[in-house]
């Protein structure tokens, strides 16, 4: 997906938020914003938004010296969702359709997203659970996903954010973890899940976890390790979570199942489902 | 008031909104945003936000060839509030304290502000009337304003936005128009009131109207005509409406009464009253 003009104010908001998480010094925030503004003024809009996100977070690391400005909020959301985990597991166990419930919960977790400078206040996990369990599913691909999952012996599951990966764990457990490889980001960027987050929520003990070798808040295949590229090409089924993965993988040559909540108007227009939609789409 | 880092994403949002009002061509929006981003990357943050606003709207006029992108929404809000005018006049006439009611209504009108790329949906005039009539006044200067108005024979009233000026007309009628000179912007910028708007809402027939000679969405005195500078220095009482005027006049050497609603967190912090406050302040 290309970058739209509407993404530009969001890049600046994102840069402001991350610089504030990293530093209390307004002169640091100012330097970051100026550098991001300069990059925006000449950026290639045919590239995907996570490519600019990657650049923004490199600027932030360089200007602040802080490797992971989102460490605190990532930990907070991992812990928060771990507390919900037993209740969510009960919900799946007691459901008429445990697979659908696990898919819907995985999508519920996608609300935990600081992309575009979204504030912590906008991240209402309980509300997202309620909506994701009850809204009609958009995208029309639940049954296709169910069949593909029934047949697959090698599932690549591309994670999105910290906190959200506890919800992913529930779906992975439903898929049976021995068939699944979980791909996480190669290093800290935004509130995206890394191998440390996978460890923090117990995923390392139940599933193979593969860091993708990249510091982009999405999956830019050209920037990923050879191992990830190969697995991506060869897996029986690829499931990708969230907006950053959609933006970077919606135009690749193999089919991918996207699970996400629509959280901005640009994505709503691109994917064709309204803001707030609970989406299972095959692209 | 200086420019804060939080203002930067708003500048870009503003530029996007105005370029969309002016043109349907995404390549035009892109050129505007790139040029504004470039300007932001080197801007002098000690300057006031309306100084950047002035530059943004010059870029928009240059890139789109459209002199007044907000013409349609300005007309819409002038017409909308003119329809409310008889009811609002009745409210003042029937009030225990007609002066306070007229002041509160003038502040209610300050919700009609497209600054920072605020969307039309965020401009709920009826709600603002309700809140402005009932909330406790912040700023503590209502009685000071009443006394100053009682004694003044020469009142300079600096308008802010189209639509809003119909509310201003009600307060000006309460102050008695023969004592008042109304200052408007020197040319179209954002949804700010110009002499055309003053004419459209009947103000030219009841009060002296003085365009300020500037194309900034505020009152940058150095950029105003000599007539405005002199009147500003010599008037018995200066009343200034809204955020753009506050941002540009809060540090000048003479006392000014500011009437406004607090519509962003940066102003809330600067002025010391929370978001949504209904403010009569003497600075």
Image (cartoon, coloured by chain):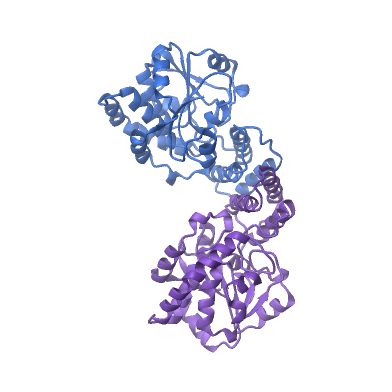
Chain colours: A purple, B blue
How many numbered marks, from 0 up?
A: 0
Residue B125 image point, x, y percent: 38, 39
Image quadrant in which you'd find residue B218: top right
Give A106 or B197, whichever is nearer the viewer: A106
Give B116 or B202, whichever is nearer the viewer: B116
**Which quarter of the rendered picture does the N terminus of chain B lie within?**
top right
Whether residue A4 is visible here, answered yes or no, is yes
Q: Residue at x 52, y 42 (%)?
A: B265
For residue B179, side relative to residue A57 (left or right)? left
Give B43 or A188, whichever is nearer the viewer: A188
For residue A30, side relative to residue A134 (left or right)? right
**Name of the residue lying farthest toward the left:** B94
Residue A208 image point, x, y percent: 64, 81
In this view, A108 is above or below B198? below
Q: Residue at x 35, y 41 (%)?
A: B127
In this view, B157 is above or below A216? above
Q: Residue at x 46, y 40 (%)?
A: B275
Residue A103 image point, x, y percent: 48, 76
Whether residue A44 is visible here, answered yes or no, is no
Residue B193 image point, x, y percent: 48, 29
């Amino acid at each position: 997906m290309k970058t739209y003009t509407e993404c530009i104010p969001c890049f600046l908001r994102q840069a402001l938020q991350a610089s504030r998480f990293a530093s209390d010094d307004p002169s640091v925030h100012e330097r970051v914003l100026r550098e991001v503004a300069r990059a925006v003024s000449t950026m290639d809009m045919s590239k995907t938004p996570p490519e600019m996100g990657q650049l923004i977070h490199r600027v932030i690391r360089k200007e602040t010296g802080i490797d992971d400005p989102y460490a605190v909020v990532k930990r907070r959301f991992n812990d928060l969702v771990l507390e919900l985990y037993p209740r969510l597991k009960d919900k799946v166990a007691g459901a008429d359709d445990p697979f659908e419930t696990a898919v819907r919960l995985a999508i519920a977790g996608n609300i935990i997203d600081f992309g575009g400078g979204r504030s912590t206040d906008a991240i209402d996990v309980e509300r997202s659970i309620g909506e994701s369990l009850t809204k009609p599913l958009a995208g029309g691909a639940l049954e296709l996903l169910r069949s593909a999952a029934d047949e697959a012996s090698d599932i690549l599951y591309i994670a999105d954010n910290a906190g959200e990966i506890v919800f992913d764990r529930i779906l992975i457990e439903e898929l049976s973890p021995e068939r699944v490889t979980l791909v996480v980001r190669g290093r800290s960027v935004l509130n995206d899940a890394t191998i440390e987050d996978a460890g923090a929520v117990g995923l390392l003990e139940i599933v193979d976890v593969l860091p993708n070798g990249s510091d982009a808040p999405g999956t830019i295949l050209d920037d990923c390790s050879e191992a990830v590229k190969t697995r991506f090409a060869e897996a029986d089924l690829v499931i990708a979570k969230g907006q950053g993965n959609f933006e970077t993988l919606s135009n690749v040559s193999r089919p991918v199942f996207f699970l996400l909540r629509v959280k901005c108007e640009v994505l709503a227009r691109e994917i064709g489902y309204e803001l707030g939609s609970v989406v299972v789409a095959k692209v």
